[in-house]
Amino acid sequence: MALPVLAATAARLGVALPEGALEYFERYRELLLAENARAGLTAITQPAAIEARHFGESLALFAVLRGLGALSPREPGGVVRLADLGPGGGFPGVPMAIVDPSIAFTLIEAHGRRAAFLARVIDELAVARATVHHARAEDVGRAPGLRGAFDVVVARALAPLAVLVEYALPLLREGGLLATPKGSRAREELEAAAGAIAALGGTAEEPHPLPLPPDAAPQDVLLVRRTGPVDERYPRRAGVPARRPLG
């Protein structure tokens, strides 16, 4: 069987893979490895590790969001809009798009070569409801049609939570959810981001453990919901949130 690690992971998570999905993932892995040296997509290059870490952990986050009801349309016939901030090689957004093509994905990537790679992946895998924005998160957060437009924002290993909320909350509609997996210092990041979350009209929710195999280092999914208005001052200009996180 192609991609046995991914197939077993999907079964463990209760994520049904659409017909042909394993072939799409296999082609995705081929593209990732072929373009990695040029675009700096990942430090993980062993095929089985790509299945477990990149594909499997993306599906684990998908399973958490689905369990929370965050991937269900608010109205019958509606579409969930999800933004992936700084996906690099496409994680977690592209694996999610492969397993659930009903969701509208926007991949926001500041690095030009990585953005070009993502556009190629979307084209070759025929991911119909996915688009790539080659832009910084601070600029997208002020863009008409994108500010306040998303139901869910995800990010994986992009920035500390105190910085990430300034990127993400302006993109969310009121009631929308930011979800970001974090490692052993997750609770510390959540505590340190309390001031930023409040300043940006958000409310922290109880973290959820990322459903990983027993031999994997534990991660928690930090969750911040936009519950109030976001001041027009935010996000600040490019580079400022990372240099001077809100306290």
Image (cartoon, grey):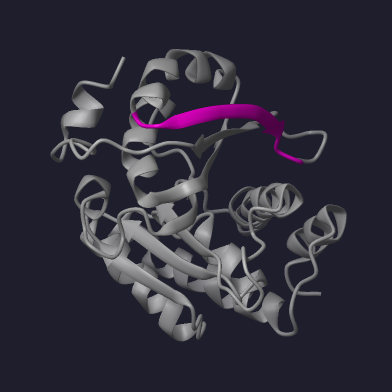
Q: In this view, does 186 lie above or below 94?
A: above
Residue at image position (62%, 69%) is 75
- Residue at the spot 19% in from the left edge and 24% down from the top edge: 243
Q: Nearer the viewer, residue 154 or 43?
A: 154
Q: Which picture quadrant has residue 240?
A: top left
Q: Is residue 209 magenta?
A: yes
Is residue 156 or residue 43 the one in the foreground?
A: 156
Quarter of the image with the C terminus is: top left
Q: In this view, does 240 lie to the left or right of 29?
A: left
Magenta stretch: give its range.
200-211
Left or right, 108 with respect to 50, comes to left
Quadrant showing the N terminus: bottom right
- Between 246 and 118, the residue placed more toward the observer is 246
The residue sitting at 86% across, 54% down in the picture is 12
Q: Position of residue 166 (x, y in %)?
A: 32, 35
| Residue 221 appears left or right of 149 | right
What percent of the width, then of the height, locates residue 242? 24, 28
Q: Is residue 117 on the magenta stretch?
A: no
116 in relation to 77, above or below? above
Residue 173 located left or right of residue 235: right
Query: Above or below — where is 65 with respect to 158?
Result: below
Residue 86 locus on image (x, y percent): 37, 50
Which secondary structure is most common in the magenta stretch?
Answer: strand
82 versus 188 height, above or below? below
Extreme-left residue of the structure: 237
On the image, the x and y values in percent for residue 188 come to 52, 13
Q: How many labels does the image show?
A: 0
